[in-house]
Amino acid sequence: MADDKKKDAAPAPGGDGGEKKKGGNLILTIGIVVGILIIYAPVTYLLVPKPPANEEEIAQKAKEDSLRIASEAATKVGATTEDTPIEFIVNISGAEDRFLKATVIFEYEEKNEKLGAELRKRAPTKYKDMLIKHMSSLSLTEITDPSERDKICKDLQRMVNASLPKGMGEIRSVMFTNYITQ
């Protein structure tokens, strides 16, 4: 009889006790999966960018991207022709006994070594002549007004870029390293 009680107390292998354990593991697994989903759903919502809703947002995003790219390009310093500056003295148009003495260098992409070589080759003759002709045609007001210098630099940049062979590349900017009027 004592043996019968022991047999009743001990669960049979693969019997009722085994089913409770499997059911407990299933509930635990479901709980873990639900917990993971509860944690990852808000994180995913916050980290995944939402597509723009309308054309105005798309245009605004494009504008912000172009401004960021432009500011990065503006702050990045490229290679220059500082070793071969173009120095010149010109009489100021319409002003007797007034002249401008200036020195100009060009900035270009560092990786474009061909362009650098071409600029250095043309600087002492072609570009110096181009700069003298352009600068001597400017009035005293244009030369002495600080706000006009940016316009002068842009004009010179367009002229130099137009004179370069196709496929050679372009200069980024024209910079005055010396600018004296008298």
Image: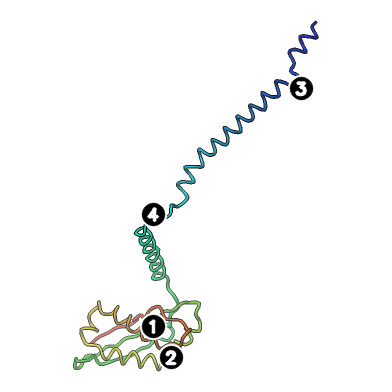
Question: For the view shown, which residue lies furthest in the front direction?
Answer: 54
* Residue appearing at x 74%, y 18% in the figure: 11
Which mark is drawn over residue 53? 4
Q: Label 4's element? A: loop
Distance in Å between CA atoms under marks 1 and 2: 12 Å
Read off the residue under disc 3: 13
Q: Nearer the viewer, mark 1 or mark 4?
A: 4
Q: Nearer the viewer's eye, disc 3 or disc 4?
A: 4
- State how many labels appear: 4
Q: CA distance from mark 3 to mark 4?
A: 61 Å
Q: Please, which colouring scheme is shown? A: rainbow
Which of the labelled discs sits on residue 122, or is there none? Answer: 2
Question: How would you rate the neighbour count of disc 2 (Cα within 10 Å): few for under 14, some for 14-19, many for 20 or more?
Answer: few
Q: Secondary structure at mark 3?
A: loop
The dot on residue 181 is none
In this image, 58 relative to 139: left or right? right
Q: Amino acid at mark 1?
A: Ile
- The mark nearer the N terminus, 1 or 3, is 3
Q: Is residue 23 left or right of residue 6?
A: left
Q: CA distance from mark 1 to mark 3?
A: 92 Å
Q: Nearer the viewer, mark 1 or mark 2?
A: 2
Is 85 placed left or right of 40 in the picture? left
Looking at the picture, tell me which residue is in the foreground, 158 or 180.
Answer: 158
What's the residue type where badge 4 is placed? Ala
Q: Residues within 10 Å of mark 1 (few under 14, many from 20)?
A: many
